[in-house]
Every structure is written in structure tokens, then in C-alpha cells.
Image (tube, rainbow, N blue to C red):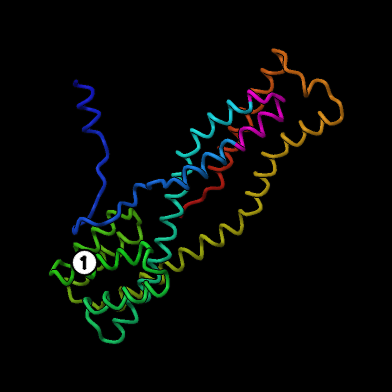
Amino acid sequence: MFFKKKKKEEEYVELRGILGNGKDYHVYHMTKADFLAAGVLGFALAAVVLFAFFNSAPVSVIGGIVCAKACPKYYREYKKKKQLNELRTQFKDLLESLTSSYSAGQNTVEAFGDAVNDMTSIYGEDADIVKEVQIISTGLQNNINIEELLLDFANRSSLDDVMSFANVFEICNRQGSDLKRIVSDTREIINDKIEVEMEIETMIAGSKNELNIMMIMPVIIVVMLKGLGNTMAGANNAATVFVKIICIGIFALAYVIGQKIIDIKI
């Protein structure tokens, strides 16, 4: 009973924001299509590799099923990271819209109201940034402080750029500073950050391709050896099975280490 209670207390409670309809970007909810894509990808990858090494349909199917069940966890992390990258790009465009509105002499309520239309025209009604700007605009119309709304968005998004903007905006808004300059400077900083990341991505693109090729080569070599009539490559006695398992483990570990090396964050 005690352990059940402790486990229940440790369960993560999603953030829903000030208005109760916000999205918690710390969590990604997998759709049926996501589960299907992850399962098929995991099964196919494991089945092909295991069949190439062991030439056994039962082993390939069992390994594919195990991998298919484990793959959604990593696929969820991939989708969550992709979602945050898209949100940051959309946030940059939001700042550009706000800069234009402040330059035209509009106040904060009007600026965010126009931003809803701008973001909808660019990304469509279902985009995350559109829903976030709608929450902020609705909150402003209900006399909720802009500082609270921005901090709420920042906490739910977990993006450093949004949190920095929210903190700077709060200080400058209370001191009566030039909001147009603050928004414009923040947009420039994010632009520079994205450009640097794109340059780094271009520089390491070759290394990523080399890593992927290195992971595929063992399978190709084994298939070629079998095609040339090499009996050791197709044998499944105790010694060869042990060696094959060790080799697969080494290549899997090398791939994980390689991914960590080329995963450069700013």
C-alpha cells in the first residue's frame, strides 16, 4: 500500500497553464500513427539485421517484436525534440510579428491580437504557436498580466529562448523600456542561434552519413560472405552465435556513442 501511494505521488502532473487549456511540451502524446510507425520501423530494422546474421526466421521475428515494443520510447523522444525545434522556429516568427506591431505604435494587447492572425496565415490554425498566442491574447482580454502569460508559456515549453524573452519582457515592461527594441533584439539573438546550429549541422552532416554507413556495412559484409559461400558466416553453432551477439552489441554501442558525439547543442 505504501509503495503504491509513493508511486502515485511520483507520477508527473502535466502543466495546463493559467487558462487550463495549455499544452505541456515536456510530454509528447503518441498517436496511433506514431505507434504504428515506430513499431514497423523497429520490427523491420531488427528483423533484417538478425536474419542477415543468424539466417533464422523465428529469431528475426522474436527480435523484431522485442525491438518493436522498445522503439516507441525512443520515437517519442525524437518527436518531442522535433516538436520543440518547430516551436522555437515559430516563436521567432512570432517575435517578428510583434516587432512590426510595436513599430506601428500598437500596444501589447493589439500586438498579440494581430499576431494570432499572422501566425494562423503562416502555419495554420492547428500550429502550436497559434494556440499559444491565442491563449496569451485571451488572457490579456481577461485582464491577466502579460508577464504571467509569457512565463506560463515559457514554463510549459521548456525553451530557453522563450524563458529568456519572458524574463526580459517582464523587467522592461515594468520599467517602461522600449518593448520594440527588446522584441527585436531577442528575435535577432534567436536568428543568430538558429544560423549557427544550421552551420554546425552542415559541418557534421558528412560525419552523420559516415556513421550510418558504418552501421550498415556489417550487415552488407555478412550478406556478401554468405553469397560467396562462406560457411562460417552462415553457421549457427555456440561459438559463432556468441561472436555474432558480441559483434551486434559492439556496433549498437558504437552507434549510441557516435550519436552522442555528433549531437552538438548550443
Residue 15: % across, % down: 25, 50
* Front residue of 185 and 166: 166
Q: Which residue is at a point 59% across and 41% down the rendered structure image?
A: 258
* Front residue of 254 and 43: 43
Q: Which residue position holds label 1?
A: 170
* Range drawn in magenta: 44-59
239 to 14, vertically: above or below: above
- Identity, as a three-letter code, of the amino acid under mark 1: Glu
225 to 107, vertically: above or below: above
Residue 139: % across, % down: 18, 67
Residue 43 sits inside the magenta stretch: no
The single residue placed furthest to the bottom in the displayed view is 104
Residue 45 sits inside the magenta stretch: yes
Most prominent secondary structure in the magenta stretch? Answer: helix
Q: Which residue is at a point 44% across and 51% down the rendered structure image?
A: 81
Q: Which residue is at a point 30% across and 78% down the rendered structure image?
A: 114
Residue 70: % across, % down: 49, 33
Q: How many marks?
A: 1
197 to 258, vertically: above or below: below
Taking the image as shown, residue 134 lies to the left or right of residue 127, namely: left
